Image: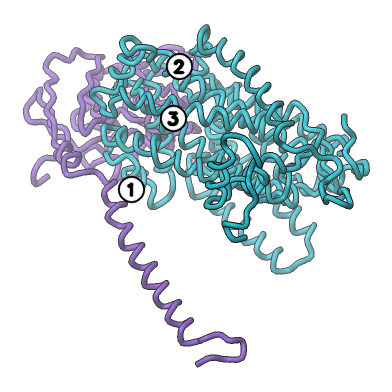
Chain colours: A purple, B cyan
Amino acid sequence: MTDHAGVNRGRRTLVIASACAGSAAAVAGAVPFAASMLPSDRAKALGAPVEADVSQLAPGEKMTVEWRGQPVWIVHRTPEMLEGVKKDDAKVADPKSERKRDELTPEYARNEYRSIKPEYLVVVGICTHLGCSPQDRLKAGPEPFASDWEGGFYCPCHGSLFDLAGRVYKNKPAPDNLKVPPHTFLSESKILIGEEKKGA
Amino acid sequence: MAATEKRPVTEAGPFNGLLTWIDQRFPLMESWRSHLSEYHAPKNFNFWYYFGSLALFVLVLQIVTGIFLTMNYKPDAAQAFASVEYIMREVPAGWWIRYLHSTGASFFFICVYLHMFRGLLYGSYRKPRELVWIFGMLIFLCLMAEAFFGYLLPWGQMSYWGAQVIVNLFGAIPLIGPDLAIWIRGDYVVSDATLNRFFAFHVIAVPLALLALVGAHILALHEVGSNNPDGCEIKKATDPHTGIPLDSVPFHPYYTVKDTFGVTVFLIVFSIVVFFVPEGGGYFLEANNFIAADPLKTPLHIAPVWYFTPYYSILRATTDEFVLWVLTPGVIAFAGLIIWSVKNTVLRAAVAAVAIVLLVGFFTLDAKVWGVVLMGVSVMIFFLLPWLDRCPVKSIRYKGPITKAAIAVFVVAFFVLGYLGTLAVTSGRTVAAQVGTAVYFMFFFLMPWWSKMDKCKPEPHRVTGK
């Protein structure tokens, strides 16, 4: 089994085979370590739906509830605000919310105002760029970042703008509209966030 | 050499017996000689050569202060912020140890940036020191990771939202991105799980890697020998009897004394900051970080610590328009330039293929993805420096006007990007950052051409002693 160069080929084959087997075992052993970094069962369980009472929310105001550790905004839009949303159609990148529909806009929110009831906007207040929470600029009027502002949200991190339907402005770092979370109205003034209407 | 044949270490004195006993069992004197008393370093080291040893000093300082901070710090989202305040107000000398650590982080980067700039000035990355440079770059990457993980620990607003933004960068990677970001965080948002694991990385995983890499960096350096401000190889002119380079001095005591002086001056400057301006005017410790993390509210103005701002500026500068009007023509022109310059058909085809893939990507993926890619490239490109520089000489002293101008313009771009990265965005600043980004990348990507065109003076055979 030994050739001219003094190499024992049989032994070399064994060395290669055992090195391969050892590497496979090392990779398999690394899997549980990598898996331990995934969200734990407790973290997953904290994703339960939350209820929001909007009976005290005056027209033109916004409230924030926490769902899965993220801020969810509920804006009670006035008729003027809804008028502003219509005017923004030309300024936003995706006016009809067609991009990544299944991820960002549930079926019942695929309309002009991105909501079940036009007056109540429910969106996750996390910028689709890099996860900052944009700030309220709810009132219409000139702003440093836009002279004809119809009201909406301004992200301080990288300057993305969103209108009062959570739609992103054109040519801003954020690629997509704000996410509309799964939600449903339990009654006139109670919204359940995190769960859709059964059978809907 | 068999253990018993080794000669006595000091020949006489009270420790001769003990040292000889150790030396017969451990390469004590051999290591001392090869790395210190008989490591022959060029005799013309100047001011710029302080920063390597200073970086090592700060590393030790960070490890020591870090050990004492962990004695009182709690890596728990509910307690972290309060435990840092506890260290600051109630632990004896806790404020001093904490400020040493937080100021030390910024000074670590100051030393490392100046150390890298020295390499750029004198061509210390050139053959045969490519691996010294690569180990150094790996140290730089570890240092960035270490700083990033450490910045989450005080659990202030800037800690929280900084981590949120950086982890979400990984979310921009097509296909695997969102799952990768969840895996890094261990939750759907930055949370207690994230804080706990960042603590583990910050206090044990990254420091171990850092120490190993510093060892490799120094071993590689001592294998090939130090470069010097003239860029000539001192090993070419040696004493015929001893083989020692004529233009060298033993590292110990010459440079150990010089570096001790450097550490003294450093400690004076460092102490002034630690005792009088520990927040560094908001650059070392940001005002928003004195507010506890609030996952529902992003601070008005969010910016990373100063040492990350040049790369952050590049990230922000990459908008749809930048991809369309700068990146797209840039890639076409660069691919054309390479194809025109090289004769190898396979290489030409490969360049064309890469360019086409990139162009397709520019029109299909979001600008956000390319921002992340450019930010990554802006750091990783330093690894290629040994092969991008085609000057016949190493040191800036003998390089021509093109190199001098290019380095000056690059330094200006780096500072401008760094400054813009600390500010909120406006349309004018975005344009400035886009110009800076273009200049930054042109410095590296066009280096093989401009460095070759440059009119260099001949390198001296011996160091000039200036």
Tell me which chain the residue with mark 3 is part of: A
Tell me which chain the residue with mark 1 is part of: B
Q: Is residue B284 visible?
A: yes
Query: Mark 2 highlights which residue?
Result: B99
Report which quarter residue A118 is drawn in. Answer: top left
Are labels 3 and 2 on one chain?
no
Secondary structure category for the residue under label 1: helix
| Residue at x 10% of width, y 25% of height | A190
Which percent across, then down, holds residue A131? 37, 32
Q: Are marks 2 and 1 in contact (CB under 8 Å)?
A: no
In space, the residues marked 2 and 1 are separated at their CA atoms by 37 Å
Callout 1 environment at 10 Å: few (<14), some (14 to 19), or many (20+)? some
| Residue at x 65% of width, y 24% of height | B260
Secondary structure category for the residue under label 3: loop
Query: Mark 3 highlights which residue?
Result: A169
Q: Amino acid under label 2?
A: Tyr
Position of B407 with respect to B280 (left or right) is right
Secondary structure category for the residue under label 2: helix
Are labels 1 and 3 on one chain?
no
Seen in the picture, residue B285 relative to A29 is either above or below; the reply is above
Of tags 2 and 1, the one toward the viewer is 2
Q: Amino acid under label 1?
A: Asp
Which percent across, then down, holds residue B173? 44, 47
Q: Are marks 1 and 3 in contact (CB under 8 Å)?
A: no
| Residue at x 61% of width, y 13% of height | B268
Position of B79 with respect to A10 (left or right) is left
Q: Nearer the viewer, residue A6 or A159?
A: A6
Query: Mark 1 highlights which residue?
Result: B179
